[in-house]
Amino acid sequence: MPGLVVFGRRWAIGSDDFVLPGAFELFVRLLWWIGILALYAVHKGRFNCPGGGLLHSYLLVLLVLLAAIICALSALVYVSMQGTISNPGPRKSLPKLLYTRLLLYFPEFIWAVVGAVWVSDSSVHCEKTVINVIMGTVIASWVIIIFTIIGVVIVFDPLGGKKTFYLTNTVSRNLESSQSGQLLYNVKNTATRVWEKRIRLLCCCIVQDDDHRVAFTSIAELFRAYFSDTDLVPSDIAAGLTLLHQEQDKMESCPKEPEEVLCHSPSSLVTDDLDIELENAAHYMLFAAAAYGWPYYVYTNPFTALCKLNSDCCRNRTTDSDITGSDRHNFHFGSILRITGLQYRDFIHISFHNKIYEIPFFVALDHKKEAIVVAVRGTLSFEDILTDLSADCEDLTLEDVLENGFVHKGITQAANYIYQKLTNDGILNQAFTIAPEYKLVIVGHSLGGGTASILAIMLRNSFPALRCYAFSPPGGLLSKSLADYTKRFIVSVIVGKDLVARLSMPNMEDLKRRIVRIVANCNRPKYQILLRGCWYEVFGGDPDNFPTELDGRNQDALTQPLLAEESLMVHRSPSYNTLEDESHLNSPPQYPRLYLPGKIIHIVEESSSRRWCSSDIKYTARWSNEAVFSSILISPKMITDHMPDVVLKALNSLSQEHRSCISC
């Protein structure tokens, strides 16, 4: 629902978000009140010790104060349980109850100070049990007050004052007026500065230069543009995600149409080609995983990795490899050697240098496949995250390539950095001098997969036989023309419901639209949605059939935002532009649609009895197309399916299955 407006500003919390925290505090307060009442009843008439009169008064006032707080909390929780996310009408009295509850913090604070003074008074000589109980009461009071202050800081919206004014005047004000235009400009600038400060705070541990400052501003603009047109609080998004997950699971459980099954039946020629590519992908995924260095090796071998790496670092082995960047104790290089199984002499160049738009990579000789392998590391640092989030589009202009188009800005700059190193520093010339008959193969996972893909496009003219294997690359990478061009030499491998492979700004806009639509039209209170969703995510079961206003509506009717949805929009998002609004037809979309590179192999896990994991998982693979990844799927495995060890496990499983079939 729209953020709660109290004290003249909007907060990042809804009027239906007080049920669960309020119920927990109510439970604690009830136990507290019963304990104090029992203490008072047991010691009634025995307050004649030094300081006992003050103790008697303290307990009486505390009982009355706790009773008032319990009543206020009960009313607050009850009112917060009423209505639905998009129907806050039954909760219109909640701000007054919230003011009442906040006012009760003042006497509670004063009484906590009085209790602390009484406990610390050396002249008080009452029973030790009573003193300990009062001390516990004082500590509990301070804990609740501190957590309340922390909660207020968390839900504070720096744009609350301006956004509230903007919301309440959206309908009445004239956007054509210069005053309104200036107001909107100021709100946007303030929002960008707020996001920029948040990003700087998160990246406070890294050295910041001009590239970082430009990236901060670009990313802040991206976040501001994405979040500025909705009035959802974090709990609304959580409720929307759990509803989408259950709705998605219900759709997946429906039987497929016969035509859909037939269209996925591959020919024997396509199957043979797929098996060959899967075997190659399983081999080269080792190089892509090795590029992560010791963090990946320790993650996959938690009990033995450190011992093995410590034994390696103590050996003084000479190597002809060109190593740049920091590698303390030889941990990174030692991990790469153990993962790939190569020798020291097989490495031409290794770079551990890492800055924004400059990511680590290595060049090695793969004698098994007779290839010169360029392996690019994926996301592993704050600098890499900034490169990922620099998601503006820019033109990629290359000689003799007619399919020029839009590409991901940050990843393109990272690819250009490696391209300059490979060509200007003579790294590839050195490699082909050693092994002139070998072919060039570029691999990478995640950010490394996207960088490897664009790097392959840059090197394609110089090395026509080049091949690239991109494992779990970002979805918003290449324009349609470039994506089609790369199908000649790039193979992308995606596992399951991988989130990153579906990440693009149009897909994020689509996810936002779906969240707004489903939460705005669900006829259940938010606390029921969240509780049922937590149970479903942890313990499984059948998806809950939440009734919504969408039931019974045809698809054509769903192209227009419903009234409840419009109440959650600050202004109409580009996702809601319809054919009736002709003004947008002649203007380019805000976010150009970008696609995955090359031909796509989609690996899916066959149905398993376990929900989170299984000791014996079977995978199936098939050729897919970019349309399959045009929507973000909500699943507990949307993150784990992206992890390099999961991708490698799936590829090895399919490769072993293929070899066993051949041997049979």
Image (spheres, helix red, strand yellow):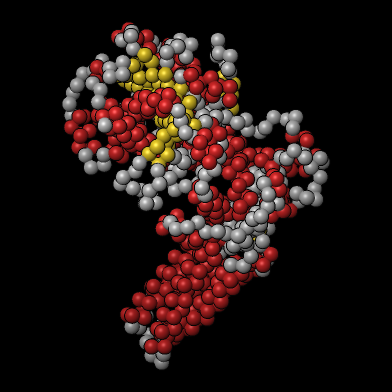
| Whether residue 388 is visible | no
- Residue toward you, 114 or 301: 301
| Whether residue 33 is visible | yes
- Residue shown at the point (35%, 19%) measured from the top left: 373
- Residue shown at the point (34%, 34%) measured from the top left: 654
Query: Looking at the image, is 527 positioned above or below residue 249?
Result: below
Residue 88 in the figure: left or right of residue 143: right
- Residue toward you, 250 or 180: 250
Q: Position of residue 231 (x, y in %)?
A: 64, 50
Residue 597 in the figure: left or right of residue 171: left
Determine the image quadrant of residue 197: top right
Q: Position of residue 59 (x, y in %)?
A: 46, 82
Residue 615 in the figure: left or right of residue 426: left
Q: Position of residue 612 (x, y in %)?
A: 38, 50
Q: Position of residue 238 (x, y in %)?
A: 53, 53
Residue 654 in the figure: left or right of residue 102: left
Determine the image quadrant of residue 396: top right
- Residue shown at the point (41%, 69%) measured from the top left: 139
- Quadrant location of the N terminus? bottom right
Q: How many marks?
A: 0
Query: Looking at the image, is 81 positioned above or below residue 331?
Result: below
- Residue toward you, 120 or 153: 153
Query: Looking at the image, is 582 positioned above or below residue 252?
Result: above
Task: Tell which residue pokes out farthest to the bottom in this image.
Answer: 45
- Residue shown at the point (45%, 55%) measured from the top left: 537
- Quadrant location of the C terminus? top left
